[in-house]
Image (cartoon, rainbow, N blue to C red):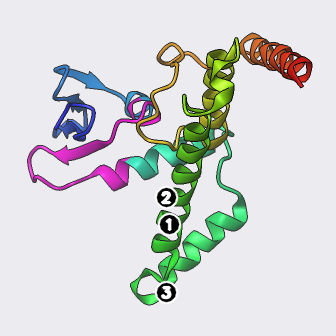
C-alpha cells in the first residue's frame, strides 16, 4: 500500500500538540485540513491512551471554518444533523450522508472519465487544457471531495485568487469559441 493510500498518522501528545509521523514535525489543524483537501486520509491518535481522535478533530476543523464565515453547511442541514443525534441509534443520517458523498464522487469520476482519451474530442487542440479546467472546476465545486483527485494542484496553502478564476474563465471562453468553429 502506497503512502498516499494509507492514512497519514498524526499523534496527539499530552500537550495537545499534533505530530506528523511521516515528516517528524508538528502540524496545526489547518495543516491537517490541507492534507485532507489534497486527497489524503488522516488518522489522529492520542499517544498516551491510544484513542482514535480523528472524528473529534475533523468536526473541530469544520466548526472553525464555519465560525470564520466559510459557511458550507446550510442551517437546515445542521438542524437535521442535530436531529439525527436525537434518534436512538443515530437514525439514517450517517448512511444517507455517506451514500450521498459516494454518489457525488462517482459522478465526478464518470464526468472526468468521459473526457478521457477514449473521447474523440481528445484529438482537438487545447483538449488537455479544457480537461484540466474541468477537473479544477469540479474540485472547486465539490470542495475536493474526490479524494484521490490527481489534477493540477495549486500551491499548498495558497487560496485561488480572483486572477486565477478570471484566467480560467478566459481560457474556457476561448475553448468554447474553438468548439463553435469546429461545428
The C terminus sits in image quarter: top right
Residue 181, percent across and down? 91, 17
Q: What segment is highlighted magenta in the picture? A: 35-57
Residue 64, percent across and down? 53, 42
Q: Give residue 87's mark.
A: 3
Residue 52 sits inside the magenta stretch? yes
First-in-chain label (1 vs 3): 3
Q: Give residue 99's mark.
A: 1
Whole-angstrom CA distance, mark 1 to mark 2, is 5 Å
Residue 123, percent across and down? 64, 19
Q: Which residue is mark 2?
A: 102
Q: Are marks 3 and 2 in contact (CB under 8 Å)?
A: no
Whole-angstrom CA distance, mark 3 to mark 2, is 24 Å
Is residue 160 among what the camera can see?
Answer: no
Are there few (<14), some (14-19), or many (20+) residues within 10 Å of tag 3? few
Residue 163 sits inside the magenta stretch? no
Q: Position of 21 compared to 93: left or right?
A: left
Comparing 177 with 107, the one in front is 177
Q: Position of 34 compared to 67: left or right?
A: left
Q: Are marks 1 and 2 in contact (CB under 8 Å)?
A: yes
Are there few (<14), some (14-19), or many (20+) residues within 10 Å of tag 2? some
Residue drawn at x 53%, y 78% as measured from the top left = 84
First-in-chain label (3 vs 2): 3
The N terminus sits in image quarter: top left
Residue 8, percent across and down? 24, 36
Q: Give residue 72's mark.
A: none
Q: For the residue labelled by badge 2, is the local secondary structure a helix, a strand or a loop?
A: helix
Are there few (<14), some (14-19), or many (20+) residues within 10 Å of tag 1? few
Q: Nearer the viewer, mark 3 or mark 2?
A: 2
Comparing 23 with 98, the one in front is 98
Comparing 110 with 52, the one in front is 110
Q: For the residue labelled by badge 1, is the local secondary structure a helix, a strand or a loop?
A: helix
Amino acid at each position: 500500500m502506497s503512502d498516499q493510500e494509507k492514512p497519514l498518522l498524526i499523534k496527539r501528545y499530552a500537550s495537545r500538540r499534533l505530530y506528523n509521523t511521516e515528516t517528524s514535525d508538528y502540524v496545526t489543524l489547518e495543516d491537517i485540513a490541507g492534507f485532507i483537501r489534497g486527497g489524503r486520509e488522516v488518522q489522529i491518535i492520542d499517544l498516551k491512551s491510544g484513542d482514535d481522535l480523528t472524528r473529534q478533530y475533523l468536526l473541530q476543523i469544520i466548526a472553525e471554518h464555519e465560525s470564520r464565515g466559510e459557511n458550507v453547511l446550510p442551517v437546515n442541514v445542521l438542524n437535521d444533523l442535530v436531529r439525527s443525534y436525537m434518534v436512538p441509534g443515530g437514525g439514517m443520517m450517517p448512511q444517507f450522508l455517506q451514500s450521498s458523498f459516494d454518489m457525488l464522487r462517482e459522478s465526478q469520476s464518470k464526468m472526468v472519465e468521459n473526457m478521457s482519451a477514449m473521447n474523440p474530442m481528445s484529438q482537438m487542440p487545447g483538449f488537455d487544457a479544457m480537461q484540466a479546467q474541468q477537473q479544477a472546476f469540479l474540485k472547486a465545486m465539490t470542495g475536493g471531495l474526490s479524494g484521490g483527485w490527481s489534477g493540477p494542484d495549486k500551491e499548498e496553502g495558497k487560496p485561488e485568487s480572483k486572477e486565477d478564476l478570471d484566467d480560467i474563465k478566459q481560457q474556457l471562453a476561448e475553448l468554447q469559441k474553438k468548439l463553435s468553429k469546429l461545428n
